[in-house]
Image (spheres, grey):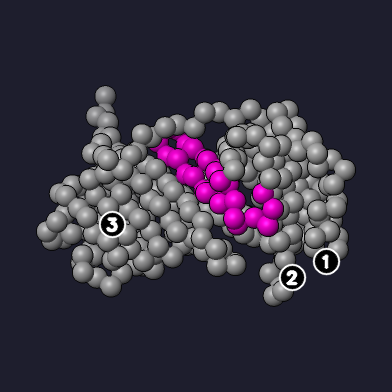
Amino acid sequence: MPLSTQSQTEGDNYVLVASLDNVRNLSNILKAITFKDHAIFNATPNGLKVTVEDSKCLQANAFIQAEIFQEFTIKEDSVGFQVNLTVLLDCPTIFGGSTVPGVATALRMCYNGYGYPLTLFLEEGGVVTVCKVNTQEPEEPIDFEFCSTNVTNKVILQSESLKEAFSELDMTSEVLQITMSPSQPYFRLSTFGNSGNAHYDYPKDSDMMELFQCTKTQTRYKMSLLKPSTKALALSCKVSVRTDSRGFLSLQYLVRNDDGQICFVEYYCCPDEEVEEE
């Protein structure tokens, strides 16, 4: 691959090198978590985890396993940095974001360590462009303390049915109410918008439902916090919906990239706490 020779002279200094024959396999999944400018990158030998947060209420994580990359070399146990995600995602569009069949933009992403920029070598049709994106010291991501032992409800369903629900629910509603119950309505999404109340119910024996494990619960979440997750929903083929004993919500999306490989995007959202007006 031409890009492997492009940065050969500096290669010994890099603490992280990640290469893809098709940059879309990275950029598409990063777009699914782009709702704030800055993202925290954390690389380990297992792959890349990218985290975006909003006001300690919402966190999105994209997991790109090392096997997804044609090359993934890391010289430390963990490499972390923070970048402007909007700027980073602008780089692959230098070639116009080619969607021509058989034409892909290749990426070689290199990082020298603390204080150095993230260097992107992009190649399409023999033309190589080098982009350098400034990095910052990463902030510590919020620990939502969402662990499987505290999960009270878990539903796995085909993404198509959730996309259908979001297209029919009233998005002018300030909240989305999620009802999960061992008896009817089993799994219900409710909105309370300008055009009245709307409910979308899923029978637990629906073909779209792969797993249904629920105790009785009803929790509301701010629609403004959930809207960013629809980007991940649009890309996904399956979604796991979980809530824990505190009412925190986990939405885990299974995403297949252009090459049929599987990546995961996970959103954590805190429940809506009604504030009394003073």
Q: Is mark 1 on a helix, strand or loop?
A: loop
* Outermost residue toward the top in this view: 278
The answer for how far apart the CA atoms under marks 3 and 1 are is 45 Å
Q: Mark 2 points at which residue?
A: 103
Name the disc covering residue 41, or none. Answer: none
- Which residues make up the magenta segment? 46-72
Quadrant including the C terminus: top left
Q: Pinpoint residue 105: horizontal percent, then vertical percent.
A: 74, 61
Q: Can residue 93 be seen in this view?
A: no
Camera-side residue of 222 and 266: 266
The answer to whether the residues at label 1 and label 2 have Cβ atoms under 8 Å apart is yes
Tag 2: amino acid: Val
Q: Which of the image's four quarters has the N terminus?
A: bottom right
Q: Which of 98 and 151 is in front in this view?
A: 151
- Badge 3 crowding class, 10 Å Cα cut-off, few under 14, some 14 to 19, many 20 or more, is some
Look at the numbered discs 3 and 2 and tell me whether their residues touch, using CB distance below 8 Å: no
Q: Which residue is drawn at 68% across and 37% down?
A: 75
- The amino acid sitting under disc 1 is Gly
Q: How crowded is mark 1: few (under 14 residues within 10 Å), some or many (20 or more)?
A: few
Q: Residue 155 carries which label?
A: 3
Image quarter for residue 237? Answer: bottom left
Where 163 falls versus 112 (above or below)? below
Return the residue at label 1.
125
Res. 65 in view: yes
Report the residue at 72% width, 66% height from top.
104
